[in-house]
Image: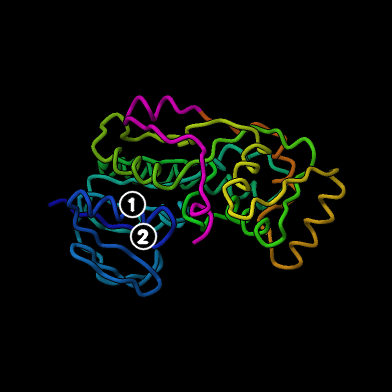
């Protein structure tokens, strides 16, 4: 029986990854800050990347489904034996390098440094590491993008976008990401490599939001307004605690194409994500 250590196991991707590991007969040790329900072959360890007790001395694979920078530091100072490491990063490493927002540029730099640190540590230990970079994640109702849009639209009966939000996007479902995480475990071609994991369809931002609203039972209206008016409404929403992750740089990117090549992941481990056909259950946890 193969064994895995999973960080971020209670998160939106982690829940799916643990489910697939158990379905495939793995023994799972998962880490969470909060109490979780154990099951057959599933043990929960209380703690985080700063401090956790009970970590096994050896596993077949380590899965990191949380912040890559924190995990890369933990892995560099750990002494756990594992022949396989699969860690999730983000395509933000590329899309936010030239952002007008200093916090976003800092995030991109930290992601880049984290990948380099992880691969350097793994190579020194002769461990096969793979980094997976999702695009815009949805499907568990816990993302900070489409699920927030759905929540706002559901509450008010409409959602506003600035005119010209025609940048291309590739939303990816959490279940497809979990499938990819397990697929790379035995894919030798993925050793020492990073992969973008886009969704199976490329569509304009405005169309992505339109399909999101159409999936809701109340069918909120999508209204496109001048950029100045959108800015005023967005500021008001953020004052109410909504859409705080949508800054000026993110609004600008609505007009930019953020498209990634699916072919390397398809070639090396059979990655085949679904098209964007959401249902209401994808947006509410």
- For the residue pair 91 and 177, the one nearer the viewer reads as 177
Q: Position of residue 271 (x, y in %)?
A: 37, 32
| Quadrant hosting residue 70 | bottom left
Colour scheme in use: rainbow
Query: Which dot marks residue 149?
Result: none
61 magenta-colored: no
Q: Secondary structure at mark 2?
A: loop
**Label 2 sits on residue:** 9
Look at the magenta stretch and give its main secondary structure. Answer: loop
Residue range highlighted in magenta: 261-285
282 magenta-colored: yes
| Quadrant hosting residue 163 | top right
Query: Going from the N terminus, do you reach mark 2 or mark 1 first?
Result: 2
Circle 2 Cα neighbour tier, 10 Å, few/some/many (<14 / 14–19 / ≥20): many
| Quadrant hosting residue 47 | bottom left
Q: Are marks 2 and 1 in contact (CB under 8 Å)?
A: yes
Q: Position of residue 162 (x, y in %)?
A: 78, 43
Which residue is at 60% across, 32% downward? 203
- For the residue pair 73 and 238, the one nearer the viewer reads as 238
Compared to residue 130, the image places residue 27 above or below, namely below
Which residue is at 58% across, 45% downward? 108
Q: CA distance from mark 2 to mark 1?
A: 8 Å
Residue 232 left/right relative to 281? right
Query: Which dot marks residue 17?
Result: 1
Q: Position of residue 90 (x, y in %)?
A: 50, 44
């Amino acid at each position: 029986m193969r064994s895995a250590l999973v960080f971020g196991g209670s998160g939106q991707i982690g829940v799916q990854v643990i489910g697939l590991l158990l379905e495939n007969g793995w023994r799972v040790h998962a880490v969470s800050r909060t109490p979780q329900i154990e099951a057959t072959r599933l043990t929960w360890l209380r703690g985080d990347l700063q401090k956790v007790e009970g970590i096994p001395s050896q596993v077949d694979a380590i899965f990191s489904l949380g912040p890559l920078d924190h995990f890369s530091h933990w892995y560099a100072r750990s002494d756990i034996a594992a022949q396989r490491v699969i860690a999730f990063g983000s395509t933000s490493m590329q899309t936010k390098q030239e952002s007008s927002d200093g916090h976003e540029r800092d995030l991109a730099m930290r992601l880049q440094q984290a990948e380099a640190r992880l691969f350097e540590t793994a190579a020194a230990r002769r461990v096969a590491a793979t980094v997976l970079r999702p695009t815009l994640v949805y499907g568990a109702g816990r993302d900070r993008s489409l699920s927030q849009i759905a929540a706002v639209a559901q509450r008010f009966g409409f959602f506003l976008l600035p005119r010209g939000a025609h940048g291309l996007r590739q939303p990816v479902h959490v279940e497809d990401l979990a499938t990819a995480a397990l697929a790379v475990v035995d894919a030798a071609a993925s050793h020492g490599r990073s992969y973008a994991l886009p969704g199976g369809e490329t569509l304009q931002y405005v169309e992505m939001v339109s399909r999101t609203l159409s999936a809701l039972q109340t069918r909120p209206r999508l209204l496109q307004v001048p950029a100045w008016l959108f800015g005023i409404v967005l500021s008001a929403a953020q004052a109410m605690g909504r859409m705080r992750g949508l800054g000026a740089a993110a609004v600008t990117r609505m007009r930019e194409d953020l498209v990634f090549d699916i072919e390397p992941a398809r070639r090396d481990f059979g990655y085949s994500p679904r098209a964007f056909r959401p249902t209401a259950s994808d947006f509410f946890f």
